[in-house]
Amino acid sequence: MPQKVSLSRLKLGDFRNYAALSLDLDARHVVLTGENGAGKTNLMEAVSFLSPGRGLRRAAYADVPRVGTAAGFSIFAAIEGMQGDVEIGTGTFGTEEGQARRLRLNGTNAKAIDELLDHLRVLWLTPAMDGLFTGASGDRRRFLDRLVLSLDPDHGRRATDFERAMRSRNKLLSEPGADPVWLTGLERQLAELGIAMALARNEMLGLLAALIDRSPDDGTFPKADLALSGFLDGEWHRPAFDLEEEYLERLRTGRWRDGAAGRTLEGPHRSDLLIRHRAKDIEAERCSTGEQKALLVGLVLAHARLVADLTGHAPVLLLDEIAAHLDAGRRAALFDIVDDLGGQAFMTGTDRAMFSALGDRAQFLTVADGQVFEGGPGHG
Ligand SMILES: Nc1ncnc2c1ncn2[C@@H]1O[C@H](COP(=O)(O)OP(=O)(O)OP(=O)(O)O)[C@@H](O)[C@H]1O
């Protein structure tokens, strides 16, 4: 059984519609109910900022501080984490405009935001992800990269460095008489980083597929088959060094074409995650809305299990408006699976009755107008 990671306190300052919040929690799941616009998703978003990146809304930091405040936002959390108790402070309070948020661990400035991954993993499922299968390939790549990042903290840096080198190459190719030595240097960087990124993605898919294979299939959340396509298809059995040389050669011979297009036409930034409904043997995008939701829930839960297996600690799960789309049987099954994961999950909804099957496995909180109260509507 993986160890539990849980938040015991959360404090927000000028975060979205919260002027000041101080919330004590026990280690059970957290159910947040309240009317539309109360601040349920905002609270989840604050928890998602306990992982690297821009949180579950992929927000611009400038949008996060409470409207009307001159300063930035702040989040403080006390956590029973992967290395024991830790106090995490993060936010843009006291930073220059446009600067990344800063991180303090136990009162000391951290060198990099990635240090959060030493203490907890946060995974989420939000209504905005409902269009994952039918939307743009960039969304699926981002989804996959977040999965990879939760197990391989270097993945984010590789992706950023790749983007930077690619931008420099595109710029150079747009200029007449580009220095071939400089171009080759950039392309070598692209080849090393690009192949490493793609290998990390492939490895994640392999691990996830193995876990999905091993899981019992009770039909509640269908199994998915996952594959990558669009970059060096059919070549991935070759050693990494060969793959780098192959990509390097393709970049070199593609210079004229890329220069004319104004962008790099081949690379890990063009690959897509293909998802199929295993039992029905059709592409996820051709499944019904309900089937797509069930597939997505199944994928996120499989990923959570994988993170728990590989790190020995269950991730904190954020499930925004999860209950609304599921019938009572599926809802109860979901709560059991979430509980079996062994971590702390935050769940939101407008109606507390949707969560009754959780019983005393959860603490129930009501959110209203940027404030949080104990107990749900109709509680006690
Ligand atoms: N920077 C900000 N400052 C102040 N208020 C904000 C800020 N950003 C968002 N809000 C407001 O916060 C409110 C609550 O949003 P939130 O998404 O958390 O609601 P919710 O409880 O999840 O509602 P729903 O059930 O509709 O999803 C919204 O009315 C929104 O306008």
Image (tube, rainbow, N blue to C red):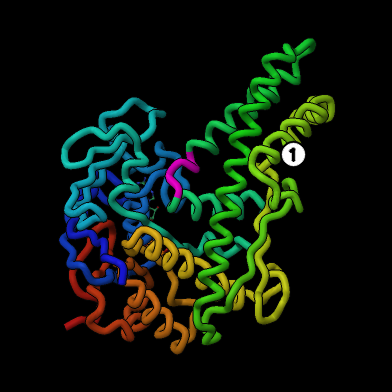
Residue 110, image x and y in percent? 27, 35
Vertical relation: 286 (above or below) 158: below
Residue 161, image x and y in percent? 54, 31
Give the residue type that dot 1 points to: Glu
* Magenta range: 152-156
Return the residue at label 1: 266
Q: Nearer the viewer, residue 320 or 253?
A: 253
Q: Secondary structure at mark 1?
A: loop
Instruction: Judge the density around disc 1: few (<14), some (14-19), many (≥20) Cα neighbours within 10 Å.
Output: some
Q: Residue furthest bottom?
A: 329
Quadrant location, ligand no. 1: bottom left
Q: Main secondary structure of the magenta part?
A: helix
Vertical relation: 139 (above or below) 241: below
Query: Any magenta on residue 207?
Result: no
Residue at 26%, 55% in the rendered image: 82
Residue 139 visible, this angle: no
